[in-house]
Image (cartoon, helix red, strand yellow):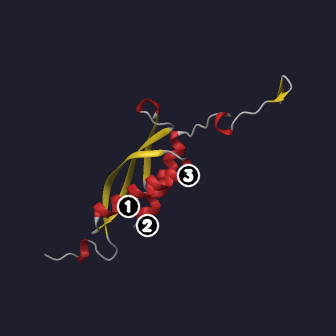
Amino acid sequence: MELHGAPFTVPPGERGATRIADRVVAKIASQAAREAVGKLPADAARPYADVVVRSQVAEGALGDAARVLVHLELDYPCDIGSRCAAVRRHVVERVGALVGMQVPEVAVHVERLHPARGQGAAGRTR
């Protein structure tokens, strides 16, 4: 395209905008949580995420930020704190790598604990 005899070019960063839907970020966060948690009992629900994406322009930064709430179930006994920390780290890493968004907050909500394989009510002693 030419404008008054000179080629008209728009720098790549100014050619348009990309909007990633909250549900897309939630799907990526859910998958990242599944990867971080690892294998769970067959009756455990799959981890899922709720996401709110907000523009950071008001905070002085460019781009969008995603606030993520991950719901999951874990086997027990386990180190719940370290597993939740691993989920938070992996969600931040994957969302940042795949979508390019900052993730300033990942809240992990453990909804249920499942007895580890081989440990059930029948295996308890008093």
User: What residue is rendered at 17% in x and 77% in y?
Assistant: 125
Q: Amino acid at mark 2?
A: Gly
Q: Quadrant of the C terminus?
A: bottom left
10 Å crowding of disc 2: few (<14), some (14-19), many (20+): few
> Which labelled disc corresponds to residue 38?
2
Q: Disc 1 marks which residue?
A: 86
| Residue 78 pos. (x, y %) | 29, 68
User: What residue is rendered at 29% in x and 62% in y?
Assistant: 80
Residue 9: image quadrant is top right
Helix or strand or loop: what does disc 2 sit on? Answer: loop
Which is nearer the N-term, disc 1 or disc 3? 1
Tag 2 near tag 1, CB within 8 Å: no
| Residue 68 pos. (x, y %) | 41, 45
Q: Amino acid at mark 3?
A: Leu
What whole-number distance in Å separates the C-alpha atoms at marks 1 and 3? 18 Å
| Residue 26 pos. (x, y %) | 49, 46
What whole-number distance in Å separates the C-alpha atoms at marks 2 and 1? 11 Å
Q: Is residue 52 above or below residue 38?
A: above
5 on left or right of 113: right
Work out which residue is located at the far right of the displayed protein and give it: 5
Which is nearer the N-term, disc 2 or disc 1? 2
User: What residue is rendered at 34% in x and 63% in y?
Assistant: 83
Residue 19: image quadrant is top right
Helix or strand or loop: what does disc 1 sit on? Answer: helix
Q: Amino acid at mark 1?
A: Ala
Residue 43 vs residue 7, the one in the foreground = 7
Work out which residue is located at the far left of the displayed protein and give it: 126
Tag 3 near tag 2, CB within 8 Å: no
Which is nearer the N-term, disc 3 or disc 2? 2
> Which labelled disc corresponds to residue 98?
3
10 Å crowding of disc 3: few (<14), some (14-19), many (20+): few
User: What residue is rendered at 52% in x and 42% in y?
Assistant: 23
